[in-house]
Amino acid sequence: MVEVGVPKVSVVVPAYNCGPHIEKLVASLLRQSLPADEFEAIFVDDGSTDDTGKRLDELAAKHPHIHVVHIENSGWPSRPRNLGIERARGEYVFFADDDDWFADQALERLYDCAKTYDADLVIGKMAGHGRGVPRELFHKNRFEATLANAPLIDSLTCHKLFRRSFLNEHGLRFPEGGKRRLEDHSLVVRAYFLSRRTCVLSDYTCYHHAQRADARNVTAARLEPSSYFASVRDALDIVDAHTEPGPLRDRLHRRWLRNEMINRLRGKRLLEAPHDWVDQVAAEIQKIIQERFAHGVAAGLPPLQRAVAYLAERGRVEDLRRLARWESGIAGHGRIDEVQPDQYAVTVTVAAELRSADEPIGFRADDGRDVLVLPVGEISPDVLDSTAQVRKARLDVVARRRETGDEIFLPVQFQTERVASPAGAETVHLVHRATTTIDFRALNGGRTRGSWLLKARITNAG
C-alpha cells in the first residue's frame, strides 16, 4: 500500500532558460487525470537567466502539488535530475524535459500499469515532434520485457517511470561533473539490467518528445568528439559487466554502433558538418570499432549500415563522404494504384520504390546473392550482401493523426516485383506494392471526423 500522504508519482523536470516553452508541459500536468493530490511535479531551475524561475515560482504559488527548487547553474540536466530524486516523495518517479508534454491520462495509466504488474520500470509509448522515438518497441504491450526478449535497448532516454525505492536501492543516479553527453544511457542501461520487472505500455501515447524550433535547450549544441565517445565507452562498459561475449552482447553493442556512430557518418548529417569535425568523429569511431566490437556487431546490421561501418573501421573518410552524397539523394517514390471507397472505409493499393538522384537503388547478382550497388571503392560483397533484406523488404502504410502525432501501422497485403535496371541485365531494382483497408471508425475511436495523414514507409537494405 502507498503510505498516506505520499504521492503516487513525482515528476522531475530540469529547467533552464525555457521561458514560454515550458507552458505546454505545465498545461499537460494540470490536465492529468490522476488527481492533483496524488502526484507532485518538481521543477529544478538550473540557474536560469531569463524569467523561467519567476514563471515557475508563480506556478508553484497557485498549485500546492508543484514545487520549485533553484540551484546555481550546473550546465547540464544531470544535477537537477539527481536533486529531483532526492526531493521526490512519490512512490514512482518520472523524468520529463521542459519542452515536452504528457498526454492527459499518462500518469494514471503508467502508475496503474506499474502497480498491476509490480514493475520497477514502466516505459510509456512516445510520440516524436522533430525527434526520433522508438517504433518497434511500441508495437504491443509488454509486461515482462527484458533486454533479451524486447528491443528495450532502442529506448535509452530517461523519460520513463521508475520505482523510487528501486533507484535508491541501486544508487541509480545521473553522472555529474560538467557536460556529460548521453547522461541518460548509463542510468537507463543499468536500470534495464537490474529491474525485477519492466513493462512497456504501448496502447496509449503517454509522452510527447519535442525538438524546440529554436534548438536552444541544453543538449542542442554540437558534441565534442573525445568526451562524447568516452560516454559511449562508459555505456559499453556497463553492458560488458552484465553480459558474456556472444549474440546478446553483440545486439546491445549494435545499438551504439548504429545510433551514435554510423548515423553520424551518413547522409546530410555528415555532409552538413565541418570537415575537420567529421575527421575527429571518424577517428574516434574507428578506434571504438577496432577495440570494442566483435565481428557479430556490424554483421547484424543491414547492408548499407554495414558498408558505413566497414569504411569507418578502415578510416576511409572520403568514401564515407561519397556514400553520404549518394544516400542524401535517396527518396521514396510512390503512387496510389487503386482506391476502393466504402461508407466508412477505403481500400488503397500503394506502389513505391527507392531511388537516388532519380536512379533506382540497384542490386547486382553475385553467386546467387543480391549485392547492393554503391558508388564507392571496393567493399567486400559479403558486406553488401542484401539477399535476406531483399526477401524481408516491406512497405508499411502508417496512419498519423495530425492533431496528436499518434501513428498506427495498418495491416497490409504486400508483394515485391523485381524489375531489370537500365544498368544491365544482372542488376535489378525493387517495386513494392501494399494494399490496406482504412476503417476511419476504428482509427478515430468510433468518430468519423478527424484529420489523418497516410504515409508509406519502405524498409530495404538499411
Image: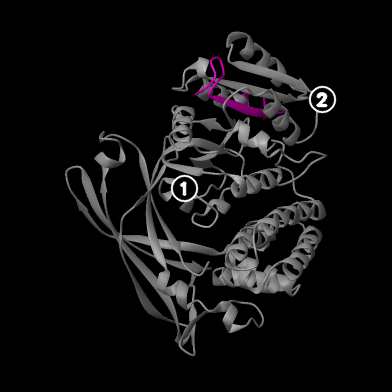
For badge 2, the amino acid type reads Glu
**Contact? badges 2 and 1 (CB < 8 Å):** no
Residue depicted at 67% across the width and 74% down the height = 310
Any part of residue 214 in sight: no
In this image, 212 relative to 135: left or right? right
Q: Position of residue 159 (x, y in %)?
A: 58, 38
Give the number of the disc on residue 37: none
Label at residue 144: 1
Q: Count residues near mark 1 (Cα–Cα under 10 Å), then give few for <14, some for 14-19, many for 20+.
A: some
| Label disc, if present, on residue 72 of the rendered structure | 2
Residue 288 placement (x, y as % from top left): 75, 64
443 magenta-colored = no
Foreground pick, 197 / 252? 197
The image quadrant of residue 396 is: bottom left
For the residue marked with disc 1, what is the amino acid? Glu
Nearer to the camera, 445 or 357 = 445
- Magenta range: 1-20
The single residue placed furthest to the left in the displayed view is 343
Residue 95 picture location, percent across and down: 61, 33
- The colour scheme of the drawn protein is one colour
Picture layout, residue 455 above or below residue 184: below
Q: Nearer the viewer, residue 422 or 84?
A: 84
Side (left or right) of 1 relative to 318: left
